[in-house]
Amino acid sequence: MSKLFIPKIEFYITNVCNLACNECNRFNDLKFTGTQLWKDYESVYEEWAEHIDFEKIVILGGEPLLNPSILDWIKGIHRLWPKYGKQVLTNATMLDRVKGLLQTCKDNMTWIGISLHSEKDLPEIEDRIKNFFEGKVALRIEGRENNALGADWYFRSTGAPYAEVGIWKQDYFYKNSILNAPNGEMFLHDSDPKVAHDQCMFVKNKNYHFIRGNIYKCGPVALYPELSEQFDLNLTDEDKQLINSYKPLTVDMAQNGTAQEWLDHIDDQIPQCKFCPEHYAGQAIDFDVLKQKIRKH
């Protein structure tokens, strides 16, 4: 029997982040807590590996390098899906602080993608890359057209197997689902779901999420229940019910033959689209003011 297939999947492994990027579309600027340890979900991903394949795999958060089991995630995902390269998407502030990360990346076909929020911080990030490479950068290339990753800046370590790092300038964020009232109350948007869906960057970029062993069409719909539990969102009873009513794709559905039908509609509009904005005008962010103390996972 042929396996299910999704071109790209994003393993979202923590809400915790040490930056507070305004309008973060996964709400990590709110001192959001919640971290998934690999050992708690290993068995369900082992079952998934029998049923689904991907071309591209991304490990992200939050800040994934703050997950204490990040090395286990890299090793585990590679063991289950060994044919494909993996990317860890990070803000790089912890890149040279995770013991064993370099060798783990080399051994498990995993490269580092960095989201750079201000070009003036590039020298600091380059220093961290050099430290990550244990002192020496073998290759540095500038320009997306000049490297296979399509990164704004590309770096490669010495000695095979090589470690690779790509940096993408990301200093412009689109609006998320949160509305903040002057009195401090937090609301979600009440949009026309069709209009919001038509504008959605998750839909356009096909950013499907693996979270706690289930597949979601996007990050926000997966995180709304946690967001509601941790923060005092001003929601009607109907909307509270709605954010908890979304049904992700489960491994049981893959086993009983109903998963393909779910995947056939993964890009469809859903009622929860009403919580996202109708207009995605973005805004520049400033790395300097974004550092925040993290709450314990």
Image (tube, grey):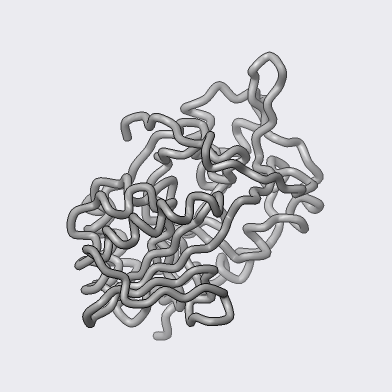
- x and y percent of residue 39 in the render? 21, 52
Q: Can residue 248 be seen in this view?
A: yes
Quarter of the image with the C terminus is top left
- x and y percent of residue 88 in the render? 38, 61
Name which quarter of the figure residue 240 lies in.
top right
Which sits in the foreground, 139 or 281?
139
Which sits in the foreground, 190 or 8?
8
- x and y percent of residue 30 in the render? 51, 31
The answer to whether residue 223 is above or below residue 3 is above
Residue appearing at x 60%, y 64% in the figure: 266
Q: Give the number of callouts.
A: 0
- x and y percent of residue 267 in the render? 65, 64
The answer to whether residue 260 is above or below residue 270 is below
**Left or right: where 249 falls relative to 169:** left
Which sits in the foreground, 124 or 85?
124
Which residue is farthest bottom? Answer: 1
Residue appearing at x 52%, y 73% in the figure: 142
Residue appearing at x 38%, y 32% in the figure: 294
Name which quarter of the figure residue 179 lies in.
top right
Residue appearing at x 58%, y 80% in the figure: 145
